Image (cartoon, rainbow, N blue to C red):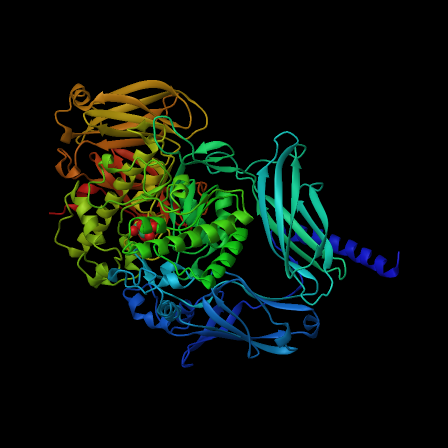
Amino acid sequence: MTTNMALKVRMFAVTAAKISLVFLIFPNLSYQDVGTIDLNGVWLASNGGGDINVNGTVPGCIHTDLMAAGKIGDPYFRFNDVEYRWIAKENWSYSRQFNVTETLLKHKEIVLVCEGLDTVATVTVNGHNVGQSNNMFRRYTFDIKSVLQSGVNTIQVTFQSAIKYAAEKNRSHVEYMVPPDCPPAVQKGECHPNFIRKEQCSFSWDWGPAFATQGIWKNISIQAYDSAVIRDVFVTPTKGDGKTTLWLIHVTVYMDVSKTSKTPVTGIVNAQLQGFPTLFVKNNVKLKSPSDQLTLTLNVSSQFKVESWWPAGYGKQMMYKVGVTFVSTDTGEVSAKLVKTGLRTVELVQETIKGSPGLSFYFKINNVPIFLKGSNWIPADAFKNRISTQYTRNLLQSAVDANMNTLRVWGGGIYEHDDVYDIADELGIMIWQDFMFACAMYPVDDDFLGNVREEIQQQVVRIGNHPAVIAWSGNNENEAALAANWYGTDNTTQLHTLYREDYVNLYVNVTMATVWSLDKSRPNITSSPSNGKQTEKENWVAKNPYDNHYGDVHYYNYKDDCWDWTKFPKTRFASEYGFQSWPSYNTLKKVSTADDWTLDSDFNDHRQHHQDGNTQMLDQAKFHFALPSGDDPVQQYVDNIYLSQVVQAMCIKTQTEFYRRSRSEIINGVGHTMGALYWQLNNIWQGPTWSSLEYGGRWKMLHYYAAKFFAPVMTVIFEDKEQLKVYVVSDLTTKLGGVTLQVQVWTWSSFKPLKSWTKVFDKEGNSANMIFNQTTADFLKDAKCTKREACFITSGLLDSKQKPYGPTNSYFLSPLKTASGLAKVNITVGKITILPDALKPGAANTLQVELKTTGPAPFVWLDSGDVEGRFSDNGFLMNVDTLIVQFYPLQSVKAQDLEKEVKVQSLMDIYRK
Ligand code: BMA
């Protein structure tokens, strides 16, 4: 052994020990043993004219920087979204100084790694242009070796107004229009977001403001190395033969390799499943190209006791870590990354169904068919740096606590922060991941396609490591827009052909092809809604992407009575459906003043971004309710907020129950519904929208209802012409045995049921079946209910010990505006006590609230005022005189604090004269 070789071997031993130590000390860190300079922190942010200079926080954005510097108020306050429009029209620049040592300068390669620039920017270091960006969804790595100097250096990132850039791009696209031009006036938005690879809803949406902000929105750092660094690791497990091999974990390692080296960079790449010392692969590598890659496969044989990852409600969310290291043979330089993974399979089943033309559309996880229950996720804030991990966790925990197992990350927002996917992995929330294209045509030229290709490649590798992600989906509603000519794309035959070609190019030839080249472990859908395999047959733009016999469907209907289930599509998969409501007074109050708290205020108009949205809410209410009455306009505003939440909760309840009870049947050729994701989970600001969680995380009435209509085992009551039917739905994988269905008839004036009907039954898991079916008139007559208007029905299950099993459901036999005997009652909050231990994550203590009522009351609503937190149940029908509910505060509170704030009301209280 030459001295040189001996030295290298020793160096290798030292570095190998160092790597193990690194992973031991920082098990959650991804470690780069190269020179790094973190450039996050305080920069100087200036406008183009140079007259505004403030501290710029990185990662961050200009709006929050101006706010922190006191130059502007809260952008969400009243009409500030319009007031502060000038900010997005300026060109802002961020600059700072940093020190570089001689040692760092000695490295062969020195790069600037920008994880996210929002969006169009030129980067200079010491006055030299080092790179450009025009896509906020891409990471940019710029070579800065030749421009760095020892000592003090200056970096400047100069942004161009995204609005102006988009307008310019549109203007120069002279061959043909790429619609839509501008959003509807009611959105108070900016035009042509489709011309810039930036969060599309940052130019406004029908639920959100236009804050097309600028800034360095993700980490930025300098890296120096001599041989090569691991840039990314992409881990996709696939099932083995089940006998000798349980899983094959494919680990693709993406390397950035020194360009200065004349010969290939050699080294050893090692991949290991943490916790299993003997489960590793080691390869000698020769890296030739500046961005080289290699794939190693970890063979998990049956001797290793590994467990699968399961969605919430189906098992544990077991996660593993794969550690990857590269050690250079020449220099001993080490680069390492640690990536989390989960072992599960996913399959999108599209096969023929007996008695139904078309194809099924449902997901199997680890071979178990799963009904996807949940909602659609939008960006949690217009200013991404305001979204803390804790805030994200609270939203996602709320989803799981409402018995959701899936969220669709909708295509008009952002590829979410790592937090979202990390927490989804941990909580078992499956993610349907859209690519970021929504409600528009796109300018499909070579530059644009190249840009998108890079974006997709990076995002698939980043997001695709998460077992939670179960599907890739090309865009939101763009196939539907083409098929139904939303934007005039079909006005001539020539246009028709052109836009369709563009569509196929973007979503099939580029997006889908890029995804397939990287990831074959998940299904790939071109659009939502779409017809799956049938869409492909029809050259990717189906005649009717809303076909109930195929794929997924979006369904919005504000005109008809939403309690009428016959209007709903008996689709294979409902991926969007919704109704708006106002957020609580408490939430609105934070961004408004007393003048704003009336239905006809400018503010109330201004916050509504959906054409006729406010009227639609009231019109829908009128089907079943009298509108609030009283003399105090503010009180009336508050009462309307409450009523809108009642209406929204009932609409989505009725619709979701319809989808869930349709899972096992085919009626008139349609059915087998296997997914219900309502629109939308969260809110971007304090405004009336379709969300069930308010900005800030407060639960609307709908979210409490979701916990029940998404319960794993539940009952659904409905009428089918003259018949009253009750279905029992079970998502359990096991059989229900010896369970009792109880159906009861009640009047509005007594705590005692007129009649109780029971039946003991057994039922297979993963199915919905009708257990009760009687003529309504006969059933009511039997119960001695004199007329429909005087009665309501409840249903529920009892276990073998006659204890309630799953939620109780209720069914109103008439609109409540015509209910007879429904009177104003007195509901009071009695004792509030603190329970000894916290039951819910994040809750420091749990409080118990006792309620009493003088008579049956629908839609009993507890409001905790300024005390943030949520109740164990809310918005319920109270047909017992005393009830106990729990309150889970966000932060510890005293019983007196809640006592002071808590208010209770029910429906009849909104009729004040
Ligand atoms: C669908 C969504 C969103 C929109 C929602 C409500 O079209 O994909 O674009 O916010 O409906 O209108």
What residue appears at the point 72 percent right and 47 percent down from the top-left corner? 282
Q: Nearer the viewer, residue 501 or 768?
A: 501
Q: Residue furthest front?
A: 494
Tally the marks.
0
Q: Position of residue 207 (x, y in %)?
A: 31, 55
What residue appears at the point 46 percent right and 56 percent down from the top-left corner? 388
Q: Nearer the viewer, residue 307 or 139?
A: 139
From the image, which quarter does the N terminus lie in? bottom right
The quarter of the displayed image where residue 145 is located: bottom right
Look at the image and tell me whether residue 639 can be seen.
no
Q: Position of residue 669 (x, y in %)?
A: 31, 29
Q: Nearer the viewer, residue 554 or 506?
A: 506
**Left or right of 174: which side holds 252?**
right
**Left or right of 33: which side holds 883?**
left
- Whether residue 124 is situated above or below residue 542 in the rendered picture: below
Q: Position of residue 149 (x, y in %)?
A: 64, 78
Look at the image and tell me whether residue 504 can be seen.
yes
Q: Residue furthest left?
A: 913
**Left or right of 195: which side holds 367?**
right
The quarter of the displayed image where residue 290 is located: bottom right
Q: Position of residue 184 (x, y in %)?
A: 26, 60
